[in-house]
């Protein structure tokens, strides 16, 4: 099931940390069924091996004035390695793009975007995204409301 060699305690630790990254080591150890020192060693091993990539605060976009979440499906003019790398690098420079994936199928990239409002999103799509020299097509989808929000990995 897992590529990494994880036991039941590691899995409990990962589940708890994904649910609450601010949990104390003492509470985490209690929930995992072990004492604090070995729990801390396990967490550090999970971090060192890259299974745990980092910790973040999950922010509420609308409360911060970011009312629009949209997705852009982007098709490139040519799918050469250089064009794919160039467009990938461009996504890192666009603050509205919060996550980006190279995908197979009808499009080449899927971009998750967050903006203050529709005007800001439209300006980004027209003036930056569609204007990129590698871009052939852009299809956008605006979200109505988020109906599910869980950790990114089922464990």
Image (tube, rainbow, N blue to C red):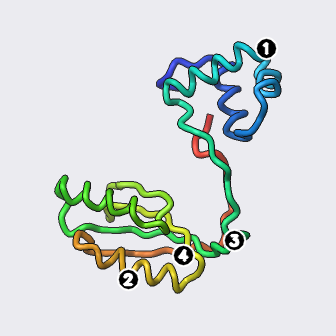
User: In the image, residue 78 lies at what x, y percent?
Assistant: 18, 64
* Residue corresponding to mark 3: 62
Count of number-bearing discs: 4
- Mark 3 or mark 1: name the one nearer the start of the chain: 1
- Mark 3 or mark 2: name the one nearer the start of the chain: 3
**Residue located at (66% from left, 70% from top):** 145
- Mark 4 or mark 2: name the one nearer the start of the chain: 2
Indicate which disc residue 142 carries.
Answer: 4
**Residue located at (58% from left, 41% from top):** 153
- Mark 4 or mark 3: name the one nearer the start of the chain: 3
**Image marks 4 and 3: residues in contact by CB distance under 8 Å:** no
**Residue located at (58% from left, 45% from top):** 152
* Residue corresponding to mark 2: 126
Q: 81 left or right of 33? A: left
Location of the C terminus (image quadrant): top right
* Residue corresponding to mark 1: 35
User: In the image, residue 85 lies at what x, y percent?
Assistant: 26, 54
The kind of secondary structure element at disc 1 is loop
**Front tag of 4 and 1:** 1
The kind of secondary structure element at disc 3 is helix
**Residue located at (44% from left, 83% from top):** 123
């Amino acid at each position: 099931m897992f590529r990494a060699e994880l036991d039941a305690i590691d899995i409990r630790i990962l589940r708890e940390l994904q649910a609450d990254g601010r949990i104390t080591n003492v509470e985490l150890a209690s929930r995992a069924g072990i004492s604090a020192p070995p729990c801390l060693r396990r967490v550090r091993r999970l971090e060192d091996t890259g299974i745990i990539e980092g910790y973040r605060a999950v922010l509420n976009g609308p409360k911060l004035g970011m009312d629009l979440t949209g997705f852009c499906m982007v098709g490139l003019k040519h799918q050469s390695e250089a064009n794919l790398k160039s467009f990938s690098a461009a996504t890192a420079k666009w603050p509205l793009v919060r996550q980006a994936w190279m995908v197979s199928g009808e499009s080449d990239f899927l971009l998750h975007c967050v903006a203050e409002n529709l005007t800001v999103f439209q300006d980004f799509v027209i003036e930056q995204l569609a204007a990129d020299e590698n871009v052939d097509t852009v299809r956008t989808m605006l979200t109505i409301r988020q109906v599910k929000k869980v950790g990114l990995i089922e464990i």
